[in-house]
Amino acid sequence: MAGGAVVNTSGGKDYPGRLTIFVFFTCVVAATGGLIFGYDIGISGGVTSMNPFLKKFFPEVYNKKQMKGSANQYCKYDNQLLQTFTSSLYLAALVSSFFAATVTRVVGRKWSMFTGGLTFLIGAALNGAAENIAMLIVGRILLGVGVGFANQSVPVYLSEMAPARLRGMLNIGFQLMITIGILAAALINYGTNKIKAGYGWRISLALAAVPAGIITLGSLFLPDTPNSLIERGHPEAARRMLNRIRGSDVDISEEYADLVVASEESKLVQHPWRNILQRKYRPQLTMAIMIPFFQQLTGINVIMFYAPVLFETLGFKGDASLMSAVITGLVNVFATLVSVFTVDRLGRRKLFLQGGSQMLVSQLVVGTLIAVKFGTSGVGEMPKGYAAAVVLFICLYVAGFAWSWGPLGWLVPSEIFPLEIRPAGQSINVSVNMLFTFVIAQAFLTMLCHMKFGLFYFFAGWVVIMTVFIALFLPETKNVPIEEMVLVWKGHWFWRRYIGDADVHVGANNGKGAAIMRA
Ligand code: BGC
């Protein structure tokens, strides 16, 4: 991740300042960053279920697909190259996020966003004009580089620009925009699939240029964050900027002083990567690896990437399968709103445990419904009402994810790292997420072919493991000021053994800290 202090949300302090027009503008840019990521997630599945696209680039898959009835439904899309089309983006994002971290730190967040947007634009153009698989894959890689840069810089930029008390909500606002991007992609696929001349897939892929254009142009008008300006040796410009974004009549001296201190402190840490390996950071390191890993092992991207393909596998005709993707997309957006409004009241653990249980039951039901109709041979048809039941349980599953592992998979890691290991911790979080997004994208269609309906039981098994993991190992972090987070670990039945008394430095809020430890 980019260096610089991201003073987090959960808010020990509340500096004066209102939601100025500048800060509002940063929200819009962050939103387009989320839209781009979401659009990419949602577009590929629909495109890979379109016949003209398959005929042109993946004729083998197309021919298999035409063999209706007798053919094994589980295996008709099993093709490494087809999966590479989807997954290449995430591998590129994984690699580029490390470079993006340096660009973000050295030249600032703004130019990192600009680079991301521009790479995106080129990728979208290449994909829309693709004449062969190489153009397709290179295009996807460029989009991936764009995602890597955007996902690295936009959230950092947002955290640094937003007034402290709005940071938590903005964090999930970013996830909300991801889901809107996914939904937009599903709707566009539904529309472009109707184009008789067969070039609909080109429009779907080329339209990624719209959000990309917005972020590229938008970034040019954005000011740099005060944190980045301080870090790059422009303290006066930083003070002016802070004044501008909080309001010219606002006293920013305390916030400014804290920014300077945070920046100085983060400069003192020479080896954040070695630091995070210390015993006292074992809880945070564990979460930075396990939370994104588990988020992907819920199997959510099976639905997000391949919903149309999956629904078509289940016997829905082309149009109906794209429509089903629109339905799951809508459920995803609305269920995410639930978390926006409940996460600070109900807390993280309740959402994780409830969402996990809901996903578990839905996956078991979906797996069983498919098993009954297709068995292990994969041969069969689904009557309409039956298929509707499958869609219903898939929606219940998506809703469970959308108010638990979806937003919390990003929020919780972002709020548990102390400043000295925050950049390293965030890098681990993002890269583990991208790595397993890649793995699922690359392996799903093959897994479906080999594990058949058992694939749903496979993910259900992981959901059991992760839900137990949360119940046992994740302490509640709602409303805990970030500077006091160490007390949460110190008060936890398991993690307390990793934290010595000397590691606990409680700030001004001693009384509250003690209360957290007792709870
Ligand atoms: C995940 C993505 C997923 C999306 C679905 C995000 O939190 O990181 O992998 O596709 O949620 O809404």
Image (cartoon, grey):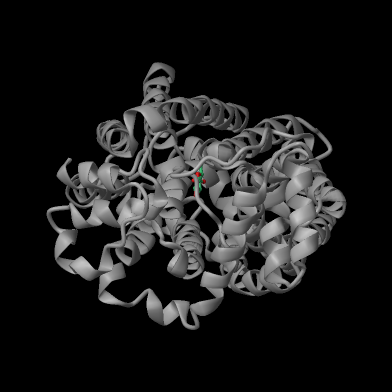
Residue 392 % position (x, y): 40, 23
Residue 479 % position (x, y): 37, 38
For the C terminus, the image quarter is top left
Looking at the picture, tell me which residue is in the foreground, 145 or 259: 259
Looking at the picture, tell me which residue is in the foreground, 424 or 54: 424
For the N terminus, the image quarter is bottom right
Looking at the picture, tell me which residue is in the foreground, 317 or 269: 269
Q: Is 173 drawn above or below residue 493 in the view shown?
A: above
Q: Is residue 243 among what the camera can see?
A: yes
Q: How many marks?
A: 0
Residue 232 % position (x, y): 72, 72
Is 90 on the left or on the right of 204, as rendered? Answer: left
Q: Is 269 drawn above or below residue 50 in the view shown?
A: below
Q: Is residue 1 among what the camera can see?
A: no
Residue 326 % position (x, y): 59, 28
Furthest residue toward top: 385
Q: Is 84 drawn above or below residue 402 in the view shown?
A: below
Residue 385, quarter of picture: top left
**Residue drawn where x is 52% and y is 61% of the image:** 79
**Residue drawn where x is 19% and y is 60% of the image:** 495
**Residue drawn where x is 25% and y is 32% of the image:** 361
Is 209 on the left or on the right of 496, as rendered? Answer: right
Is 138 on the left or on the right of 66, as rendered? Answer: right
Residue 236, quarter of picture: bottom right
